[in-house]
Amino acid sequence: MNPYSHLVVASELEAAVAPDDIQEYYWGAIAPDIRYIAGMQRQQTHLPPQDIMDSIYRYPHLRSFLQGYLVHCLCDEIELDRIFSSHFPFFIIKNKMTPKKSAVLLELFYLENKRVDFQISGTCNEFMQDLGLSRDLTDRFSRAISRYTALKSPQAGLGKLLQLLGLEGDPRINSYVASAESFQKSWLKKNILFLAIKAGGIHRSVV
């Protein structure tokens, strides 16, 4: 799942999770993706659910942050391409929906159709320090995410996020940006796919 998608799903789950600190919760819901600017492998920040649960007992004052962190890591276990394949009403299109394209399309859909105001704390806490993350990195990442989620022109999308993070040319993300650009090239195709997301109830299935 891409950054804004994580925050949208976290907002849908907020009432069920009932975090004490909303800004910490949303910060946790996006924090694992700091790995891109930290140059870390996915498994270094996307931890097993039980490890995150154990950390809640270790850092009870970070409960809201870790609840959001858990939501993020669980979301990344969702096989979006299977959801799209089983719910997309257009069989010709759905057969071409790879996991990467599914994630990018959902991100674009949320950016353009589910605008929600988020505030994240951006705090460099003990949990993040234990992962080897510095205050400079967390500050840089939180500023970039805050600017990305507040984009006045959501069509800028993932390409703008790369600029904000200083990751232009990063091969780990370039393919996602290329997929986003291909969707954006055809207004008609993109909006037909958006209609399919709504008609297929894909957002409800993800949540």
Image: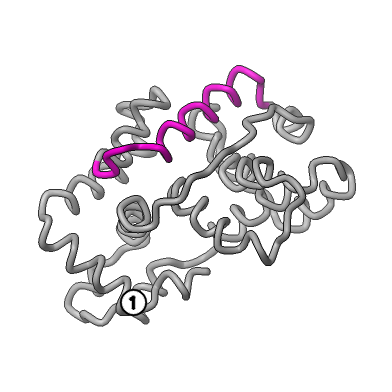
For disc 1, the neighbor class at 10 Å (few under 14, some 14 to 19, many from 20) is many
Query: What residue is drawn where x is 52% and y is 50%?
Result: 7
Q: Is residue 42 above or below residue 10?
A: above
Query: What residue is drawn where x is 66% and y is 26%?
Result: 133
* Quadrant position of residue 35: top right
Query: What residue is drawn where x is 42% and y is 66%?
Result: 80
Indicate the position of residue 91 as horizontal and vertical percent values: 22, 81
How many marks do you count on the picture? 1
Foreground: 114 or 201?
114
Indicate the position of residue 178 as horizontal and vertical percent values: 23, 44
Query: What residue is drawn where x is 35% and y is 73%?
Result: 84
Magenta stretch: give its range. 133-155
Would residue 117 be found to the left or right of residue 130 on screen?
left
Query: Coloring scheme of the render?
Result: one colour
Q: Identify the residue position indicated by label 1 in the image.
A: 85
Indicate the position of residue 75 as horizontal and vertical percent values: 55, 60
Q: Is residue 169 magenta?
A: no
Indicate the position of residue 105 as horizontal and vertical percent values: 30, 58
Would residue 133 be found to the left or right of residue 100 on screen?
right
Q: Is residue 199 above or below residue 29?
A: below
Q: Residue furthest top?
A: 136
* Type of amino acid under label 1: Ser
Q: Is residue 146 magenta?
A: yes
* Quadrant position of residue 18: bottom right
SS of the residue under disc 1: helix
- The dominant secondary structure in magenta is helix
Foreground: 40 or 129?
129
Would residue 14 be found to the left or right of residue 164 on screen?
right
Q: Is residue 205 above or below residue 29?
A: below
Q: Quadrant of the N terminus?
A: bottom left
